[in-house]
Amino acid sequence: MINWKVILNIAKTHLLTKMKSTVTAGLGVTFGIAAYITLVSFMTGLNQMLDDLILNQTPHIHLYNEIEPSAKQPVAKYSEFENALNVVHSIRPKRSQKKIHNALPILNYLKKDKNVRGATPQLRAQIFYLSGSIELGGNLVGVDIMEEVRLSNIQDNIVEGTPEALKNNDNGILLGAGLAKKMSLTVGDRVQISTVAGDIFPLKIIGIYQSGIAEIDNIQSFSNLKTVQRILGEAENFVTDINIKLFKITEAPAMAEVLQRQFEIKATDINEANAQFETGSSIRNMITYAVSITLLIVAGFGIYNILNMLIYEKMKDIAILKATGFSGRDVQLIFMSQAMIIGIVGGIFGLLIGFGLSVLIDNVAFETEALPTIKTFPVNYKAMYYIIGFTFALISTFIAGYLPSNKAKRIDPVRIIRGT
């Protein structure tokens, strides 16, 4: 029967009598785990920020009418040309309306779907922004602002003003930050909007919108849906886009196909809309985890080398233990216990130091004009990373202790005492 009290007492004595080696081994575990926690928390936090920057502004499913060439050209309607070689140059797209047919019934249908978290109508209009002698082309998007707040976190990108201010103002506009800068406008000023037909409407700037993507902020602004409908002279059912948010994003591709067939409308899911971004995000995550795993493996080898040297320094102690009646298994358990104690203590300190460094990074100022809502460096405090780090500390020290202690188990005490 194993006497754990004696084994742990001897293990503790060995660790305390060789403090230099013990501390060195413990620091190897501590800094290896601390570096892993700090690196993976910061890099995944940064990746998450970039993902949110794009994905929060992208609906899970986007419904709209797309301008595209006719699937069947006029020449194909004549049977006499059926088996002939037809060469047609400069195929023109078919004339299609931007308006979504039966937009309001489609919205009502979607809102009743148990898989749909919400569906918001939009009206996109090509306009010109006029301010003094400045004339800039861009887009004005009519939205149900409070639904956008609920579903897309648009409020996070409003750097001046509030969504409620836009809701309560029928002639208000959330002006893109790039446009506001170019035209030297701010909240409370007025900007004139000119439609393609030449009609001009003055709108009051009740807020500044900044997505962090310059190409959007330089051309796009938001107003109430009814305001844009009035500017274009269209009815209340005139909607060009419907954005859908689901409870489960994984259902978006399948549902987009169903909606496209059901309503004969173009439906783009989030994966299709962000295919290139998803590829970049996957590569960044792959690099993050590859570097993290490499860091843990390197730390593991360091731990093994330190514990291996620690056991070789204890050769005479091993001989004495065996000579006094300890079995090879007892000797192995003593050194395994030392390794696990180092792993547990070093792992705990590693997690604490890693958490402390993460908090320190999280409080470092990070200010950029492109991302005004981000004030500090992003850090991910996901509990799984800490569980992985501590588990690795235990596994690595177990392996690092098992291999040399297995050799110690088979040592002949007579040869050690003789010095051969």
Image: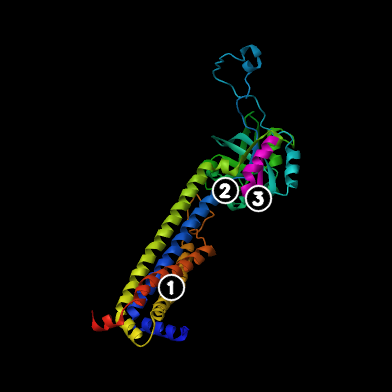
Q: Look at mark 3 in the image and give the residue it sits on.
A: 151
Tell me which amino acid carries mark 2: Leu
Real-space CA distance between mark 3 and mark 2, rounded to the nearest whole angstrom = 12 Å
Circle 1: element type: helix
Task: Bin the neighbour count of mark 2 within 10 Å (Cα to Cα): few under 14, some 14-19, many 20 and up.
Answer: some
Q: Which mark is residue 247?
A: none
Horizontally, residue 405 falls left or right of residue 122, namely: left
The color scheme shown is rainbow
Q: Start and end of the magenta stretch?
A: 241-261
Q: Earlier in the sequence, mark 1 or mark 2?
A: 2
Can you give x and y, in whole percent of width and height, for residue 415 in the image?
26, 80
Q: Nearer the viewer, mark 1 or mark 3?
A: 1
> Label 3: few (<14), some or many (≥20) within 10 Å?
many
Q: Magenta stretch mostly in which secondary structure?
A: helix
Q: Position of residue 233 (x, y in %)?
A: 71, 32
Q: Which residue is mark 2?
A: 55
Q: Residue at x 51, y 44 (%)?
A: 277
Q: Earlier in the sequence, mark 1 or mark 3?
A: 3
In what element is the residue under mark 2? helix
Q: Amino acid at mark 3?
A: Leu
Asked if 106 appears above or below 406 in the picture, the reply is above
Would you name the residue on which mark 1 appears?
A: 343
Q: Quadrant of the C terminus?
A: bottom left
| 417, above or below 206, in the image | below
Residue 412 visible? The answer is yes
CB atoms of marks 3 and 2 within 8 Å = no
Specify the quadrant of the image occupied by residue 198.
Answer: top right
